[in-house]
Amino acid sequence: MRFLRKYLKMTQVEFASYLEIDKTNLSKWENNDDKIGDQSDRLIRSITVALGDGLKERMEEVVRVFCRIHKSKRRPKIECDAESLSVSYA
């Protein structure tokens, strides 16, 4: 979570405003003090791809893995390389 927020160059307050949550909730997620819900997970991924430099063309690929978020105990992993603007999913 923190990586994605920092990748977008946002403060906790800014990112929390996109999610319509309090920054304390975001802090709990970033510090693994609270579990991120499935819907929030999808929203976070959508925001990251929509606002991340050079990632918009990957939106379809991100949306296609949404169905695995709630069906799997292991969440799909998204890795972004800010320098090469590459994204990979596992």
Image (cartoon, rainbow, N blue to C red):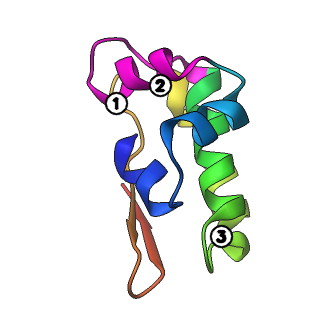
**Mark nearer the viewer, 1 or 3:** 1
Circle 3: residue type: Arg
Residue 82 placement: quadrant: bottom left
Q: Residue 30 has which mark?
A: 1
Do residues under tags 2 and 1 come within 8 Å of each other at their CB atoms? Answer: yes
Q: Measured along the vertical axis of the image, is residue 57 above or below residue 44?
A: below
Q: Which residue is mark 3?
A: 58
- Amino acid residing under circle 1: Glu
Q: Judge by depth and name the residue closer to the eye, 13 or 5.
A: 13
From the top left corner, tell me how far across and down residue 65 is, in percent.
58, 46
For image coordinates 36% across by 51% down, the residue present is: 3
User: In the rendering, at what x and y percent does residue 36 appear?
Assistant: 46, 20
Q: Which residue is mark 2?
A: 26
Above or below, comparing residue 77 to residue 50 in the picture: above
State which tag comes first along the sequence, 2 or 3.
Answer: 2
Q: Looking at the rendering, which quadrant does residue 57 occupy?
A: bottom right
Which residue is painted at 72% across and 71% down in the image?
A: 56
Instruction: Assess disc 2: are there few (<14), some (14-19) or many (≥20) residues with their C-alpha within 10 Å of its C-alpha.
Output: many
> If the image is split into quadrants, where does the N terminus sit?
top left
Q: Was residue 26 drawn as part of the magenta stretch in this picture?
A: yes
**The residue stretch that appears in magenta:** 22-38
**Residue at (59% x, 46% y) in the render:** 45
In the rendered image of this protein, does residue 90 appear above or below residue 24? below
**Looking at the figure, which quarter contains the C terminus?**
bottom left
Q: Residue at x 39, y 34 (%)?
A: 75
As measured in the structure, the alpha-carbon distance from the residue carrying label 1 to the one carrying label 3 is 24 Å
